[in-house]
Amino acid sequence: MNIKKHIPNIITLLNLFCGCIALVFAFQQEFLLAFYFVCLGIFFDFFDGFFARLFKVSSPLGLQLDSLADMITSGVVPGVIMFQLLLKSFGEEKIISISSWDNSVMILPFLGFIITLGACYRLANFNIDTRQTDSFIGLPTPANTLFILSLPLVLLNPNLEFITNALQNHWVLIAISIVSAYVMNAEIPLFSLKIKDFTFKKNALQILFLATSVLLLLVFRYLGIPMVIIFYVLLSVVNNMINKK
């Protein structure tokens, strides 16, 4: 029995397991614990491919398992988180019981699952898109998930009044959901974060991004996470414009 060929799939299933745990915490509005388990799931998501390449055991089964696991960790979980944020945006007095919900509370929170729909479409499309072997077109689902799961953590900081007020507005949250689904599937080439050699000239863009990301995370903590994701997309757009000239 070749144990090596099963290791990547076991790691993929650990990603799925973490996603299921994060999903439970998301329903319980334990946002920090959900964030931690999603981060652990994304960690496993990175290493399943790493070990598949290392052991040279890549397979169609592994590809499908990877997408199915990501659908939970990076698709359903952020949708539930956004649903919870939208629900909370209406105030506790309006969500005591389902029977007391008005029409807006009955409908609008479910629009958070636009993120889940966008993630599903991207994951399915990624499996058949041969252009995304070394870089990405559209924002990867794990990056989008970190963006969404950082939002309730930003709300824990009382010193960010302008931002926290915005994140408690259901129209802002719905706009974020729509933009999130769009950016995951947009025809926006994003530069690869892989460093293939150690020359500064060939990796200047990656080094700039990584250095800026570390600085943003150290200074802004949880707020730094969405800032890093936004910076990644904007830097890629600028880089694309420069390369076209």
Image: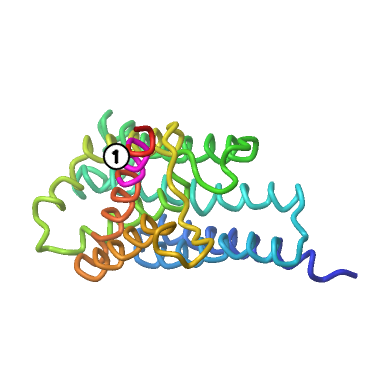
The one of 171 and 220 positioned closer to us in this rendering: 220
Residue bearing the label numbered 1: 176
In percent of width and height, residue 84 lies at 33, 49
Q: Which residues are magenta?
A: 235-241
Residue depicted at 26% across the width and 40% down the height: 173
In percent of width and height, residue 79 lies at 42, 45
Of all residues shown, which one is farthest toward the right? 1
Q: Quadrant of the N terminus?
A: bottom right
The image quarter containing residue 45 is bottom right
Of all residues shown, which one is farthest toward the top? 103
The one of 195 and 60 positioned closer to us in this rendering: 195
The one of 214 and 120 positioned closer to us in this rendering: 214
Is residue 119 shown in magenta? no
Is residue 238 shown in magenta? yes
Judged by its main secondary structure, the magenta piece is helix
* In the rendered image, the vertical position of residue 41 relative to residue 227, given as above or below: below
Q: Quadrant of the C terminus?
A: top left
Q: Is residue 201 left or right of residue 119?
A: left
